[in-house]
Amino acid sequence: MIKVSSALAARMKQMEGFNAGSCFHCGTCSALCPLGNKLVPRKLFREVMLGLEDEVRASIPLIFSCLLCRMCEVNCPQGVHIADNMRSLRVFFNRQEFDLK
């Protein structure tokens, strides 16, 4: 069963620095990750925007393993601020999941 949370999408849209809306899912970000990380930013951002909370929560370890090196961001043809989006997700989960302020 897929659980959709419109609240997740709404909260992330309010987070400063989260701008995944302009991603057109080209895959450049995934191809350039120096870690060869299994995290696919375009998939993650889509899940956030659709409110697929369980899928996003399952990616928490990968969200925190991102180096924030901006290699993906520098090469993004749409100018999506991928590292800032990852930081926003970290802040969100630090507050919601881990109760850190």
Image (cartoon, rainbow, N blue to C red):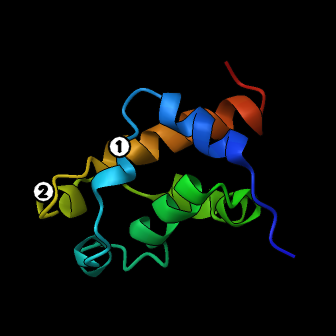
**Residue 19: x %, y % from top left:** 35, 43
Q: Nearer the viewer, residue 49 or 83?
A: 49
Seen as rendered, the residue at the extreme right is 1
| Residue 45 visible in this rendered orientation of the protein | yes
* Tags 2 and 1 touching, CB below 8 Å: no
Residue 18 locus on image (x, y percent): 40, 39
Q: Earlier in the sequence, mark 2 or mark 1?
A: 1
Residue type for callout 2: Val
Q: Against 81, is 36 above or below?
A: below
Mark 2 sits on what residue? 74
- In the image, which disc is placed on residue 41? none
Asked which secondary structure carries label 2, the reply is helix
The CA span between labels 2 and 1 is: 15 Å
Q: Within 10 angstroms of label 2, few (less than 14), some, or many (20 or more) residues?
A: some
Query: Which label sits in the foreground, 2 or 1?
Result: 1
SS label for mark 1:
loop
Is 62 in front, or is 76? 76
Residue located farthest toward the top when viewing the structure as drawn:
101
Q: Residue at x 37, y 51 (%)?
A: 20
Residue at position x 36%, y 51% in the image = 21
User: Residue 68, can we see it?
Assistant: no
Residue 98 location, x and y as percent?
77, 35
For residue 73, above or below residue 27: above
Q: Position of residue 90 (x, y in %)?
A: 55, 41
Location of residue 53 by image quarter: bottom right
Q: Is residue 85 left or right of residue 82?
A: right
Q: Give whichever of 82, 70 is nearer the camera.
A: 82
* Residue hosting label 1: 19
Question: Which residue occupies 49% across, 36% down?
Answer: 13
